[in-house]
Image: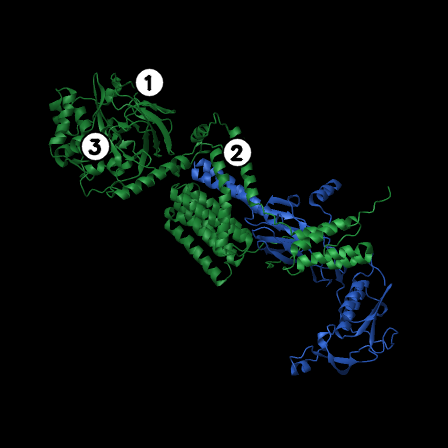
Amino acid sequence: MAAIASVQRWLFRLTPDRQSPIVLGQRRIFILPTRAGLLFATVLAVMLIGAINYNLSLGHALIFLLAGLAVVAMVHTFNNLFGLRLTPGRAAAVFSGDLAHFPLQLENTRRQSRRALDFAFAGQPVASFDLPAEGQATIAIAYATRRRGRLEPGRVTLSTRYPLGLFRAWSYPHPPWSCIVYPKPIRTPLPPASAAVHADHLQGDNGQEDFAGLRPRQISDPTRHIAWKAVARRPDEQPHLVKQFAGGAAEELWFDWSLTPPGRSEEERLSILAGWILGGDEQQARYGLSLPGRRIAPGQGDAHRANCLQALALHGESGESGG
Amino acid sequence: MAKAVKAAAKPGTRPAVPLEHGAVPWLLAVALATAGPHFGHLPWWLSALVGGALCWRAWLWQQRRQLPPRWTLALLVIGTIAAVGWQFRTLLGKDAGVALLVIFMALKPMEMNKRRDALVVIMLGYFLLLTHYLYSQSIPTGLWLLVAITLLTATLIRLHGGAQPVATVARHAGLLLAQALPFMLILYLLFPRVSGPLWGLPQDAYSGLSGLSDQMAPGSISRLVQSGAIAFRSRFVGDLPDQSDLYWRGPVFDDYDGLTWRTSKPPGKAPPQAPTIAAGSPPQAYTSILEAHNRRWLLALDVPTRLPPDSSLAPTLEALAREPVRVRSRFSFASSVAYRANVDETPAILQQALALPPRINPRSRALAAGWASRPPREIAAAALAMFHDEDFHYTLQPPLLGPNAMDDFLFDSRRGFCEHYASAFVFLMRAAGVPARVVAGYQGGELNPVDGYLNVRQSDAHAWAEIWIAGEGWLRFDPTVAVAPSRIEQGIVAALPAGESLPMVIRIDSDWLRELRNRWEAANNTWNQWVLGYNPQRQREVLSRFGWREPDWRSMTASLAVLCGVALLLVALWTLPRRRAVDPAQRAWQKYCAQLARRGISRVQWEGPVAFAHRVARERPELAALTGEAAALYAALRYGRSDQNAAGTLRLLQECIDRLPPRRRRNA
């Protein structure tokens, strides 16, 4: 078994590809007849016997033409992959149970299009793509996530049967991909807000509660603060006006591990925390996260949300840095 | 640009690929193209069934309806198979087998849901293409092969490549076939041919072959003459003999029962005596390409002096092959048109040449008895003079004759075709005591100036007589000449009165039509010799023409493999994707990054030039300035405006590589 595994490792290069772009050379493309190809060969053999028996010269010609066609199809199937350049991109984080999409930029440097390229991770849904001549395309290969954590999808099986389906050529590009999978959120009511005002909460920080007037928009202002009524009155005015809020002591939420029901499993408690983070984000509240061994100060916005969810995703995994 | 075509639902297993809606018309076209040409020789109800099934399937496709349930199809298949068995009385054999294949081809689209089913249709189609050649291997059939095979291949491309314009698919299929052509030629020339059949062929394998029969009754030759089909083609090495010397000898009939002439069984078990021939003129060499007629006679020119291998000269002087001629074959002969044959004939043959059925034709016997005292030549001359001088007519439509056929013909109707004159002449000779027999064969032929072959058609079929004279041997007398001399000199069209029905192909008056026909027949002849007649023997001939002395299957297979390998290499090189030159700016930047990597800091693949420069500035301040400069240059080249001085910028970027500080060496 060990010998087979080492042969497989040598033949199929099971280690990730470090270089980028990944160029498919003949060393990495494998080709074998498909079941249809074997059926074709059988049909040809039967036809040859018939042609010999009935002395059909034209039948010989037909069979030889078909045999040549199969050989040519083999070359074309191989060429459909040969020289393809793959540049992996970074996958966005997803919630467990969703499809993670691993982006891959395909580059076709030759003058013929490449058709019916099937991409799939082992045991995952197949995605089929066509690539125009001398064209580029960015595709996303789906991976159905099942558990939170850092997902390393492994090698991709890139296969094609084009043009005739008599042969299947395949390759195992293995980009060093990984993707953060957040826990699947469980929506429960948010924990009560804490009244404590933390030292890091500045007095003059702009709150979200009380309307305090209009000012010209800066790039960093969220679009939901744009005073659309004012914009509608003067559409030509640039920049748009935004509403300013003041709320000295904005409420802060603390999503603490200890607030989750202790009777439930660790994964469920993480899921409940994830649900709280989503809920807090939707309410545009300031929230902090407290996990055993990790504490994230209250904050707001997409980056903060991603930071908190990532902490949940990687909770308990090695290599996670506390802070 | 790229679009996801399909996403399988269930992970883990490889699901069967469903058949695209747009691929169905292609498959119906395949079914029609491969089954359709069989309609000509299928029972009408079967053709109607196939057409109906395909129309039904097309309607279901157009309406996007569900396919019929499996059990109805099963019933339909079983019912049709039973009907085929009833129609042909068997399910084996050529015709029944083809009928079954056609049924499967028509009904398989009814349960075509998956791509797998469509592949079965295609494979069935390839097989059905082969069965057309059981019926015809003509040039049009060969051209149809190309069209149909392109359609089938295009359908395969459509099945595996998704929706594309029809023209694109067709062009791609044509390209694949063009690349497959060299392999076909190599295999065709060098694949060691086996002469079939591998097993006993069914009874119907050779049905429908036409030619002279092994017996002659009134009407048998005039029926044959209705066909313009070519019986054989001959090419002479030297000059063509005179038209009136072109007697191609077929079966010899010496046994008459009052109605039909047959070949007598050789008496006893003694081996037949070989004929003795004294040639009176230099032998003329020629090669004949004989159409299959399922008989042993080779239709050599009277009288052959050199025979092809595997053949022999019968005691009655006709050349016979060892086996019936069942495929179109080439034979080489030499013949002398002037000869003395069998001067010392065996008594048994002479006795047979005098036998007559008793009691019939009393008036003819009486006429011949009046000549019996004269020498044989004068008796023959008297008979010919009677045919010539009295009111005899040459016609394809003679009246029916009664039980005393010779009397009715000689004294009442006096209308007949060559078989009537030959048999009446022989009857008279025998009645007058002169050994005589009927010879059937072909007379004449028409030179095709395009390829120099003499075409002899079924319409040139003829019957004449031979009498034996002591000291002179067998002499040919053609009583038809006495009635219609132009039959021998100019052919049958000139000899027959206008209004007699003859095939169009030999009645052509217009010059350009004749020219067209000659060209078409010459093309057919080339096709026959090079495509259809390419058998083991011809393969040896061709290879030895290329200087290959003794080709055997081992050396042929070896050279086959080598040549196919070379062809594969050429096709691979031809179709190999050409590399586009990598952008020089990108190359320089990659080189710079590689140099940095050797100095301990490597760029991550998704890191842009500016981001990388920032990181270098943080982690390796001593390289910051240079890397920042290189990154800016690269960014300007790749993403900047194109009107800048690109060549100068590129040079600066390349110089950055040289300006890198030398690598710190580890302590040695």
Q: Nearer the viewer, residue B524 or B109?
A: B524
The amino acid pointed to by label 3 is Glu
Residue that carries the numbered disc 3 in the rendered image: B489
* Chain for numbered disc 1: B
Q: Determine which residue is flagged by label 1.
A: B270
Q: Is residue B239 above or below residue A102?
A: above
Residue B302 percent location from the top left of the image:
27, 25
Report the Cα–Cα distance between label 2 and label 3.
52 Å
Per the image, the residue denoted by label 2 is B560
Of the chain colours in the picture, the one used for chain B is: green
| Circle 2 Cα neighbour tier, 10 Å, few/some/many (<14 / 14–19 / ≥20) | many
The chain containing the residue under callout 2 comes to B
* Image position of B60 with respect to A280: above or below: above
Chain A's shade in the image?
blue
Residue B72 visible to the viewer: no
Earlier-in-chain disc, 2 versus 3: 3
SS label for mark 3: helix
Disc 1 and disc 3 on one polypeptide chain: yes
Determine whether B98 is above or below B476 in the image. Answer: below
- From the viewer's perspective, tell me whether residue A150 is left or right of residue B361: right
**Residue B596 in sight in this render:** yes
Q: Say whether disc 2 or disc 1 marks the residue closer to the N-terminus.
A: 1
